[in-house]
Image (cartoon, grey):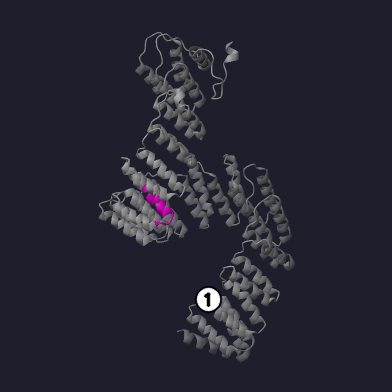
């Protein structure tokens, strides 16, 4: 009979139709056979035995042995202790079984038991099962309190189920349960995450009326949300009216730094002292990080000095900010000093710190120094993640070392780290840099066979760019067709790469066909798109069409830049239409050495050396330094007309003019 009735211990298993005592006996026998207990025990002894035994299976067997004995009857608190232990080890099906036993024995479920189950389900990402258990509260004899509601709200918030919180809150109020500060804090967090800061502000106003004064968490959440939405002035005004809180000022300073308003961040820093608040490690780290991001490393170091004088120790985030700042500004030696200092201060670097160091070394072109860092990570027991390997592959790719990239790829596979789209794309780039296009195609085919790692637009763009740069534009166009078949979204960059490749290979008809396709489908075009086509039109001598496209570009709200004007400008100079070229140069908002050199070359070509010299002086006075091509063009023209002495005299006169 037992073999047919005893089902698996899952939530959806049939409710037992035999006595709870027999169920517990069967369960105990399944887990472990232990001798019957004959010595009387107290409730406290049972609870301590369950709590302090590190082996959950043994605790459960002990619990069941007591249930099968005649010397002890389980109580709500012993059930609570056992279910809590099961929840800690995430044995939730067994916990539900015991919950059912409690119902059959008419033992009420305690508040703490219900909370343990909600927390455990939240931890395993099964918040809906937590909700189902909550709705069984009456059946389980559990009195629902504000604490139970709070833990359920928190579980829903962590699972991003914001829409379910409001109805539950309404039920809570209908049940006559008053919210406390913790309830309000969860509701405020949920509203702020949904960008409903106005509703959060209303809750803040409601709290004192309900006898729940806003605390540090309530206020900081709202201040942080206002800053995140760019409403910094409102956040500032709010701080003036509130009791001084370090965390609120930290949130405001973080918002100001994120908006690059460093001067105002400093002012808030001073105001903290005026209101009797001492900046903490978070305050200093936020400001140090902001100045490092802005490249003001000397100021960042000065703030660090002030922090140390005040007796505050930098944390891992402080060190990482400094490390990143030095590396991004090419100060590798200073970055390595920061790393050594961090180690000396016994601040253990995490995977983020290692990734920042590896990224910095690769960005500064010393990828070979990054490999020993990877080995150091492994020695220290820090597991490299997929980002670590992607950075290294990209680093080797940038210096054209495909074998180094392949080596990192093999290490990643050996260590059981599954590559993501970024890692695959970096490897495709490495193959393209070494013109190993068949291997790059194979890599994309491997991705397509992966269920959760399909090639992205960036992956295809990388291969298309590599093919176009190496004269294989036909193959790149076939890859475009493959992208469409795969349902991969084409980006503006995809079109730009192909347009550039087609024009460079003289495939003008295909290029214009692709451009017209963009126009017909109202595809979003950027400055690069227009510049590429303008350059192509000018190369074919269609200057008027290029000017018409320039007008369309302006109508679309895009500002032409030097790369837009220079091809048009060059075409007019080449056709000896110097007057129009000079007019265009005057209309250009910003001029560069290329534009001036083109005009000077055109003027020299029609023997207008006097005008060419005037434009040379003009560019100099605009702060644009002539380059080799500028001088070469002018000196060669003077040499042809006046001979060697004329060239020498021109150079001498210009040097005198420039001082």
Residue at 46% over, 25% down: 86
Q: Is residue 226 magenta?
A: yes
Farthest-out residue, front: 174
Q: Residue 129, percent across and down? A: 51, 31
Exactly how many numbered labels are in the figure?
1
Q: Residue 399, percent across and down? A: 58, 57
In the figure, 150 relative to 556: above or below?
Answer: above
Q: Quadrant of residue 452?
A: top right
Between residue 102 and residue 459, name the one nearer to us: 102
In the figure, 583 relative to 51: above or below?
Answer: below
In the figure, 22 relative to 423: above or below?
Answer: above
Q: Quadrant of the C terminus?
A: bottom left
Asked if residue 358 shows in the view, the reply is yes
Between residue 602 and residue 80, name the one nearer to us: 80
Q: Quadrant of the N terminus?
A: top right
Q: Residue 145, percent across and down? A: 38, 31
The span picked out in magenta is: 220-231
Circle 1 residue: 589
Instruction: Check disc 1 and report its element: helix, strand or loop.
Output: loop
Q: Is residue 577 magenta?
A: no
Q: Quadrant of residue 593?
A: bottom right
């Amino acid at each position: 009979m037992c073999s047919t009735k005893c089902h698996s211990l899952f939530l959806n298993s049939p409710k037992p139709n035999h006595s709870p005592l027999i169920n517990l006996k069967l369960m105990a026998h399944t887990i472990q056979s232990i001798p019957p207990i004959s010595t009387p025990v107290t409730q406290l002894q049972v609870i301590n035995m369950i709590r302090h035994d590190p082996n959950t299976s043994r605790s459960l067997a002990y619990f069941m042995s007591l249930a099968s004995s005649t010397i002890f009857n389980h109580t709500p608190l012993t059930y609570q202790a056992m279910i809590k232990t099961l929840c800690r080890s995430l044995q939730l099906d067994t916990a539900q079984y015991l919950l059912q036993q409690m119902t059959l024995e008419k033992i009420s479920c305690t508040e703490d038991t219900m909370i343990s189950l909600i927390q455990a389900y939240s931890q395993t990402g099964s918040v809906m099962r937590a909700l189902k258990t909550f709705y069984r509260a009456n059946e389980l004899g559990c009195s629902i309190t504000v604490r139970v509601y709070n833990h359920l709200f928190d579980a829903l918030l962590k699972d991003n189920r914001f829409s379910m919180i409001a109805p539950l809150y309404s039920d809570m109020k209908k049940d006559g349960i008053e919210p406390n500060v913790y309830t309000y804090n969860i509701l405020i967090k949920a509203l702020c995450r949904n960008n409903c800061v106005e509703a959060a502000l209303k809750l803040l106003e409601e709290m004192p009326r309900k006898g729940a004064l806003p605390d540090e968490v309530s206020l900081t959440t709202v201040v942080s949300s206002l800053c995140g939405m760019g409403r910094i002035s409102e956040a500032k005004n709010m701080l003036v009216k509130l009791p001084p809180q370090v965390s609120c000022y930290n949130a405001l300073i973080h918002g100001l730094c994120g908006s690059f308003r460093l001067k105002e961040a400093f002012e808030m820093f001073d105001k903290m002292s005026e209101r009797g608040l001492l900046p903490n490690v978070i305050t200093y780290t936020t400001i140090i990080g902001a100045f490092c991001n802005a490249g003001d490393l000397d100021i960042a170091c000065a703030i660090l000095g002030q922090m140390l004088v005040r007796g505050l120790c930098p944390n891992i985030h402080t060190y990482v900010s400094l490390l990143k700042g030095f590396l991004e500004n090419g100060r590798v030696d200073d970055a390595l000093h920061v790393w050594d200092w961090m180690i000396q201060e016994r601040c253990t670097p995490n995977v983020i710190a290692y990734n920042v160091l590896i990224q910095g070394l690769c960005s500064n072109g010393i990828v070979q120094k990054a490999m020993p860092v990877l080995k150091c990570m492994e020695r220290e027991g820090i597991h490299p993640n997929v980002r670590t390997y992607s950075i290294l592959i990209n680093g080797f790719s940038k210096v054209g070392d495909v074998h180094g990239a392949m080596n990192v790829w093999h290490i990643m596979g050996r260590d059981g780290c599954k590559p993501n789209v970024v890692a695959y794309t970096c490897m495709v780039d490495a193959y393209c840099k070494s013109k190993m296009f068949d291997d790059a195609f194979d890599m994309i085919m491997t991705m397509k066979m992966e269920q959760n790692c399909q090639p992205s637009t960036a992956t295809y763009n990388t291969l298309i760019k590599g093919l176009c740069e190496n004269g294989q534009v036909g193959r790149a166009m076939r890859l475009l067709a493959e992208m469409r078949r795969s349902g991969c979204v084409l980006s503006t960059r995809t079109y730009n790469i192909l347009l550039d490749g087609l024009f460079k290979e003289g495939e003008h008809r295909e290029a214009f066909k692709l451009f017209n396709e963009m126009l017909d489908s109202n595809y979003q075009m950027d400055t690069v798109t227009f510049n590429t086509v303008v350059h192509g039109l000018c190369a074919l001598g269609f200057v008027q069409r290029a000017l018409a496209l320039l007008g369309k570009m302006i109508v679309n709200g895009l500002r032409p830049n030097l790369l837009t004007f220079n091809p048009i400008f060059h075409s007019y100079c080449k056709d000896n239409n110097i007057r129009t070229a000079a007019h265009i140069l005057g209309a250009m908002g910003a001029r560069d050495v290329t534009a001036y050199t083109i005009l000077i070359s055109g003027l020299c070509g029609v023997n207008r050396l006097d005008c060419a010299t005037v434009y040379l002086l003009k560019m100099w006075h605009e702060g644009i330094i002539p380059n080799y091509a500028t001088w070469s063009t002018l000196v060669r023209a003077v040499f042809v007309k006046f001979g060697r002495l004329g060239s020498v005299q021109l150079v001498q006169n210009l040097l005198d003019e420039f001082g």
